[in-house]
Amino acid sequence: MDYILIKNGLIVNAGDAFRADLLIYRGVIARIGADLEQQDATVIDAKGCYVIPGGVDAHTHLNLTAKGVKVGDGFFLGTVSAAFGGTTCVVEHPGFGPVGCSLLHQLVHYQEEARGQAVVDYGLHAVFQHVDAKVLDEMAHLAEKGVPTGKIYLTYDGRLDDREILEVLDRAHGLGLLTAFHAENDGIIRFLSDKLRAEGKFAPVYHALSRPDCCEAEAIQRILHLAEAAGNVPVYVVHLSTARGLRAIEEARQRGLTVYAEVCPQHLLLDDSCYLEPEYGGLKYIMAPPARKKEDAAALWHGLETGSIDAVATDHCSFNFADKLALGKEDFSKCPGGIPGVETRLPLIFSEGVLKGRLSLSRFVDVVSTAPAKIMGLYPRKGILAPGSDGDVVIFDPVKDKTITPAKLHHNADYSPYEGMSVKGWPVATLVRGHVVVEHDRLLAEKGWGEYVPRHLMSDTASNKETTG
Ligand SMILES: [Zn+2]
């Protein structure tokens, strides 16, 4: 079918909401207006529903291996889960490659792994794991491969030191690339983790105590000072989790630095009491950074509402509880870190954000779709319902409710960190480039419908917008 006509819904973009019909022609939005008619169109009735741009999740690990364990998903099941949750484009963070490998190694490897597998569109971030003249020169090839973003870790084996970070930021600035940071102080983590374990403290709750909020605050402060020293280079902080980290970002912005901040549902909705769940249940929530205090979550919600935080991503990582238990039962530090969440992002943020009066409907669309599309160099192809944009559309039923159970989700993990939460507002249909991928709890797309999306430099977003009109 060349034409898809979505009728009777409330169109919601980041800027406004209005009642209209939406026509897609050959995968691209052709018209939005009142009472549209089109011969031979497949008609979808969106009465009583919101019609929103497909979700963009800028932080997934659908294909990660860590501590010798591979996540359950892979690109097929991971993107199926995304589609059921109303996300039509993910930007995957590859894990570290072989020691000393080229900056392009993981991009090539993940392209191969993803080919023919995905049901929603996907992009890739570069990952820095060491810095030398070759890596710095390879940065010049990222943009032409559609990769305008690279990630630096301040902890784990692939972490960079301050001098290396400055070299990358300096080069990124000249090339217009955006650098994302995992912000945790490695020395604090290793010191506290060793100390706690030497004292015989191996239970899941000590995971959080080995990574206190000062650990994130110090790392964020350092990143922001390095960005300033490199000449006010724009930076992006992934999975911001603390009130102190947020304050540091707000202060840096007041000094004139360009900083983007991402938050994940787990840091808005969980708190560190989760680590006390009986029967080693606390292992389910082992992730970095850990769940924080309720006051941190309140500060993060406030930041999301006011715009101090730009976007909501998931850091989705579908390890099984069984694996976490097998490896982490005797020692929290051996537990693979990461939790699933790509499918529950839109429903949770709508239910806990919009329905609880923390976010307006338009702000909800902004933080789950438009802002990440802009920052990640996908806009206006993704992130907005407008003529010329991809027909990535979610029909979202604001009164559909569901209690979250692992059996109702489509990720390949044996648990959900949000199990038992009752959530109102779920997608009833997800379209990717005009193709109905999910409708009424059924997967309709074939494996491989999802395409690699080359992303552009963020600085090109403004000029792209003009050509779209
Ligand atoms: Zn991550």
Image: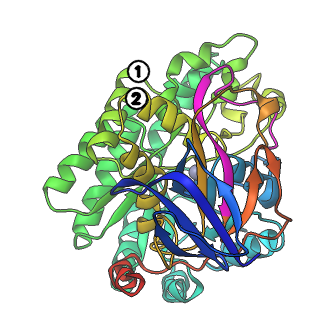
Q: Which residues are magenta?
A: 411-431
Q: Is residue 68 visible?
A: no
In front of the other: 128 or 43:
43
Which mark is on residue 352?
none
- Where residue 208 appears, as percent x and y from the top left, is 53, 26
- Where residue 313 appears, as percent x and y from the top left, is 52, 49
Find residue 232 and report its image quarter.
Answer: bottom left
Residue 284 falls inside the magenta stretch: no
Residue 424 falls inside the magenta stretch: yes
Secondary structure category for the residue under label 1: helix
Q: Quadrant of the C terminus?
A: bottom left
In front of the other: 41 or 417:
41
Which residue is outermost to the left? 255
Amino acid carrying label 2: it is Ala
The color scheme shown is rainbow
In front of the other: 320 or 85:
85
Give the residue at mark 2.
297
Find residue 255 and report its image quarter.
Answer: bottom left
- Where residue 346 appears, as percent x and y from the top left, is 56, 43
Q: Quadrant of the N terminus?
A: bottom right
How far is the residue under mark 1 from the one under mark 2? 5 Å
Q: Is residue 116 visible?
A: yes
Q: Are marks 1 and 2 in contact (CB under 8 Å)?
A: yes
Q: Is residue 389 left or right of residue 255?
A: right
Which residue is outermost to the top? 278
Find residue 13 and report its image quarter.
Answer: bottom left
Disc count in the image?
A: 2
Q: Residues within 10 Å of mark 2 (few under 14, many from 20)?
A: many
Disc 1 C-beta below 8 A from ligand 1:
no
Give the residue at mark 1.
294
In the displayed structure, 147 sits above or below 295; it is below
